[in-house]
């Protein structure tokens, strides 16, 4: 599993994804599971906190499920997304990510950059079978902005929207 967490902060999206992976391990009794994380954020300290969290969670899972060989690698990169994302996307293998996380990120970017960022991530980073999770705070203005993004992505035919509001 290859995961790109854009605007990762201290790794809360990674923590939630690890929790879901643990559920898969419990239900499917994997003998081996491999994860590659790429975390981007503008704060080096937040990324260092994410690495520490990664190492703690990985050690806990390996101890808890000794019959499953769990491997996890993490790469971090300080990225200022306000400057654009194209050159950072070039550092990834094209369409290599199974999951792209954008959590509490878009509301921090200028409106004119949001659609281009998501569109670029969908087209250049995500596998054709991959998924992107965009999550923003449930505030009036943020929700309106997210619905505009939703409509623009549908209009551009950049993505299939799974929820909310499929129409």
Image: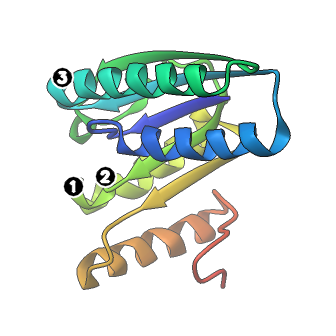
Instruction: State the SS at label 2.
Output: loop
| Count of numbered badges drawn on the protein | 3
Q: Is residue 16 above or below residue 81?
A: below
Q: Looking at the rendered structure, which numbered label has been put on residue 105?
A: 2
Q: Quadrant of residue 130?
A: top right
* Foreground residue among 62 and 54: 62
Q: CA distance from mark 1 to mark 2?
A: 6 Å
* Foreground residue among 54 and 26: 26
Q: Which residue is labeled 3 in the image?
A: 44
* 51 sits to left or right of 128: left
Tag 1 and tag 2, C-beta contact below 8 Å: yes
Spot occupied by residue 140 in the image (x, y as percentages of width and height): 27, 85
Q: Which image quadrant: the N terminus?
A: top right
Instruction: State the SS at label 1.
Output: helix
Spot occupied by residue 145 in the image (x, y as percentages of width and height): 34, 74
* 43 sits to left or right of 144: left
Question: What residue sits 81% from the left and 29% below the top?
Answer: 30
Tag in front: 2 or 3: 3
Q: Which image quadrant: the C terminus?
A: bottom right
Spot occupied by residue 152 in the image (x, y as percentages of width and height): 51, 69
* Foreground residue among 131 and 83: 131
Sequence-wise, the earlier of marks 2 and 3 is 3
**Residue 50 is at least partly visible in this image:** yes
Q: Looking at the rendered structure, which numbered label has been put on residue 108?
A: 1
Tag 1 and tag 3, C-beta contact below 8 Å: no
Sequence-wise, the earlier of marks 1 and 3 is 3
Q: Quadrant of residue 86?
A: top left
Q: Is residue 121 above or below residue 57?
A: below
* 101 sits to left or right of 77: right
Question: What residue sits 35% from the left and 78% below the top?
Answer: 143
Q: CA distance from mark 2 to mark 3?
A: 16 Å
């Amino acid at each position: 599993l290859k995961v790109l967490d854009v605007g990762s902060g201290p790794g809360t999206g990674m923590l939630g994804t690890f929790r879901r992976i643990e559920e898969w391990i419990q239900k499917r009794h994997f003998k081996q599971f491999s994860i590659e994380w790429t975390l981007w954020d503008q704060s080096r300290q937040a990324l260092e906190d994410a690495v520490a969290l990664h190492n703690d969670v990985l050690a806990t899972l390996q101890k808890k499920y000794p019959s499953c060989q769990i491997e996890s690698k993490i790469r971090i990169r300080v990225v200022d997304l306000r400057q654009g994302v194209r050159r950072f996307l070039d550092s990834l293998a094209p369409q290599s990510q199974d999951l792209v996380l954008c959590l509490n990120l878009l509301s921090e970017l200028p409106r004119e950059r949001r659609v281009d960022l998501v569109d670029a991530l969908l087209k250049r980073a995500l596998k054709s079978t991959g998924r992107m999770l965009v999550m923003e705070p449930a505030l009036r203005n943020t929700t309106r902005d997210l619905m505009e993004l939703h409509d623009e992505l549908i209009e551009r035919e950049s993505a299939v929207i799974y929820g909310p509001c499929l129409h």
